[in-house]
Amino acid sequence: MSIKILGGFARGQVLTVQKGDTIRPTSIMLRRRIYDFFQDLEGFYFLDLCAGSGAMGFEAWSRGASRVYLNEVSKHVLKTLEDNRENLLIKNHHKKSGEIKVSNAPAEKFIREFKRDYQKFDEEQKKQTIIFLDPPYSLKSIYFDVVSELIGSAEEDPWYFGQLWIESDPKKGIPRNGWSDYNLKASKLFEQGENYIFVTIFPQS
């Protein structure tokens, strides 16, 4: 199975997706909806915490993201992700493109480790950071653990100042209004069928 990058300098280039239920790529229509709005990501850092095939992150890279972090907890899926990365870098070696980092860790562990690097970014780069959270919809604890990590405790000063994109499905995952329990406010909401991507900006006011 394969899917294509929709826009940017790598438009039309193919990504391999493993067969079976191991991963669930963001639907083409939903990916198109959000990237029709966020067309130019020049200068942004993009983190995909549950990357799978890497479609969302590679799309951001193709549209100018300076650095893309692709994290995938499954070692079985990781090989396909790394192959997609290598193929794209070879095909686009002559183009000015950003850095792609691939890692293998639980999403909540990855975000805790990323926090140390993030705190060294300048103020502009902190704002120009996007975290994409799209675990298997039924694994609700991953959603809540990552969001809790980004919010921090009441005793802490806010540490994250970028965007969070959350993909889910109200039947299997989190309802659209479920994020109000964390006082998260949607700056944008993109929908395709039952699936949605909820975009919010930190810190929450």
Image (cartoon, rainbow, N blue to C red):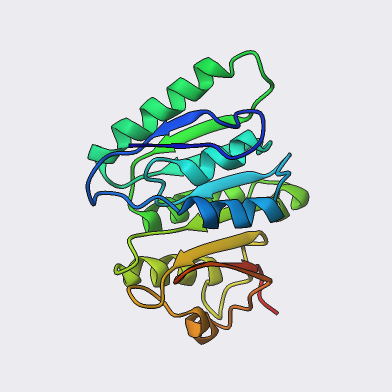
Q: Residue at x 43, y 68 (%)?
A: 168
* Residue 183 drawn at (x, y percent): 58, 83
Residue lying farthest to the right in this orientation: 124
Q: Residue at x 69, y 22 (%)?
A: 96
**Residue 84 location, quadrant:** top left
Residue 90's place in the image compared with 61, above or below, is above
105 to the left or right of 111 = left
Locate residue 187: give its quadrant: bottom right
Q: Residue at x 23, y 52 (%)?
A: 21
Left or right, 155 with reference to 122: left
**Residue 134 vs residue 204, the one in the foreground:** 134
Residue 117 in view here = no
Q: Is residue 16 above or below residue 74?
A: above
Q: Where residue 123 sits: x, y (%)?
A: 76, 52
x, y percentage for residue 156? 58, 73
Taking depth in this image into account, of 68 and 6 the one nearest to the observer is: 6
- Give the total of numbered labels: 0
Q: Is residue 159 in view? A: yes
Percent coordinates x, y for residue 167 in the rendering:
48, 64
- Depth check: give the residue in front, 26 or 119: 26
Please give left or right for residue 104 compared with residue 62 in the image: left
- Asked which quadrant contains residue 92, the reply is top right
Picture quarter with the C terminus = bottom right
Which quadrant of the figure contains the N terminus? top left
Q: Residue at x 25, y 41 (%)?
A: 19
Residue farthest top in this picture: 94
Would you place residue 82 above or below residue 139 in this image? above
Task: Choose between 37 and 119: the one closer to the eye.
Answer: 37
